[in-house]
Amino acid sequence: MNLEVMDMLNQQIAKEQHSSSVYLAMASWCDQKGLPRSASFFYKQSLEEREHMMKIFKFINDCGGAAYSPDVTKIPHEYASLTEVFELALQQEISVTQSIYKIVAKCRKVNDFGVENFLQWFVEEQMEEEQSIRDILDMIELMGDAPLKLIDERIPNE
């Protein structure tokens, strides 16, 4: 594994863990506001991000590299609205996607085909994650001034 790529993967571990913590805070906020389906959505997202982190972590070590456990700081816990929560979640996903793309580009530049192949799963996953949140934001926009409980009932709970 190319050392620069390994460093980028360790940075990705930190991004995934940060996302997991942000989604956990969002889930808590939704729970406090009586929005159980939204809370469930973000609890699930938090777990998925942690799984992504662990997948990269294990991959680095399995390839003979050194994975590092990240520090997590600066997690927001207050939000103005459910719309803001989902808008911030989309921004979070876009940031993760761009980071994955940068690693893939670096892999191509240094001919690290093994890591590039490993990251293809993440490329597809990020496309799905972004679309899922965009769909929710579209639904929230279409429902306009509907009561939050009514909106919450339509949040996917898969």
Image (cartoon, grey):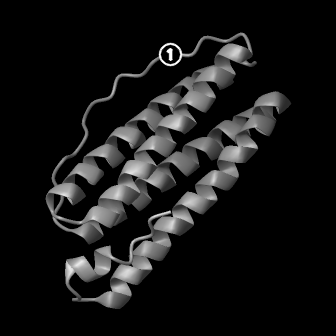
- Secondary element under disc 1, as helix, strand or loop, is loop
Residue positioned 15% across, 56% down in the render? 32
Please indicate, yes or no, whether residue 8 appears anywhere in the rendered image.
no
Residue 88 vertical position relative to residue 12 in the rendered view, above or below: below
Q: In the image, what residue occupies the spot 40% across and 40% down?
A: 20
Q: Is residue 62 visible?
A: yes
Q: Is residue 9 above or below residue 102?
A: above
Q: Which one is in front, 93 or 147?
A: 147
Q: Nearer the viewer, residue 42 or 13?
A: 42
Amino acid carrying label 1: it is Tyr
Q: Quadrant of residue 81?
A: bottom left
Residue 82, image quadrant: bottom left
Q: Is residue 102 left or right of residue 87?
A: right
112 w.r.t. 78: above or below: above
The number of discs equals 1
Report whether 106 appears left or right of 82.
Answer: right
Along the line of sight, the residue nearer the viewer: 52 or 152:
152
Quadrant of the image containing the N terminus: top right
Q: Is residue 54 left or right of residue 5?
A: left
Q: Which percent across, then down, holds residue 10?
A: 55, 24
The image quarter containing residue 102 is: top right
Of the pair 61 and 4, the residue shown nearer to us: 61
Q: Position of residue 27 (x, y in %)?
A: 29, 52
Q: Is residue 63 above or below residue 124?
A: above
User: Dot 1 corresponds to which residue?
Assistant: 68
x, y (%) of residue 73?
27, 30
For disc 1, the neighbor class at 10 Å (few under 14, some 14 to 19, many from 20) is some
**Residue at image x 15%, y 63%?**
33
The spot of residue 4 in percent (x, y) is: 65, 21
Residue at horizontal 56 percent and vertical 49 percent from the top: 98
